[in-house]
């Protein structure tokens, strides 16, 4: 519950850490990653991309969505993960 609350924190650093923490928990946290890709801060979006796993269909969906991000760094990391972790 604390991590879910941190997703709404004013601090981008707190939101990014919440994304990381939630992505490490058991269960399907793909929705958290998709929501994080809508964050106004690129560091939060980068954490979502970094936390996505290209070897699962859900993770590839997150990474494919990130390929359309406004930030070049987010797009580049998504492309790199898809190409090196067995995505496309």
Image (cartoon, rainbow, N blue to C red):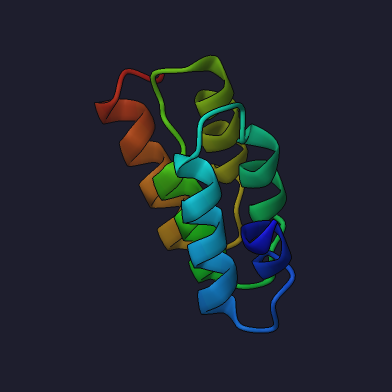
Image check: 82 left or right of 56?
left
Q: What x and y, as percent, mark residue 26? A: 51, 30
Image check: 52 left or right of 4?
left
Q: What x and y, as percent, mark residue 55? A: 39, 18
Point out the residue furthest to the front here.
1
Image check: 50 left or right of 67?
left
Q: Quadrant of residue 62?
A: top right
Picture layout, residue 39 above or below residue 54: below
Q: State the residue in front, 69 or 9.
A: 9
Residue at 61%, 83% in the rendered image = 11
Residue at 61%, 35% in the rendered image = 29
Residue at 69%, 71% in the rendered image = 40
Q: Quadrant of residue 80?
A: top left
Q: State the residue in front, 30 or 83.
A: 30
Q: What x and y, as percent, mark residue 38? A: 72, 56
Point out the residue furthest to the bottom here.
10
Query: Which quadrant, please, contains the C terminus?
Result: top left
Picture layout, residue 37 above or below residue 53: below
Residue at 72%, 49% in the rendered image = 35
Query: Which quadrant, please, contains the N terminus?
Result: bottom right
Point out the residue furthest to the left here.
84
Q: State the residue in front, 42 or 72.
A: 42
Q: What x and y, as percent, mark residue 82? A: 38, 29
Q: How many numbered dots are placed on residues in this image?
A: 0
């Amino acid at each position: 519950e604390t991590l879910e609350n941190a997703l709404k924190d004013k601090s981008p650093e707190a939101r990014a850490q919440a994304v990381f923490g939630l992505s490490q928990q058991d269960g399907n946290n793909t929705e958290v990653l998709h929501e994080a890709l809508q964050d106004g801060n690129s560091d939060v979006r980068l954490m979502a991309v970094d936390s996505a796993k290209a070897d699962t269909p859900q993770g590839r969906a997150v990474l494919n969505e990130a390929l359309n991000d406004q930030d070049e760094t987010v797009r580049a990391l998504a492309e790199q993960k898809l190409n090196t972790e067995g995505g496309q």
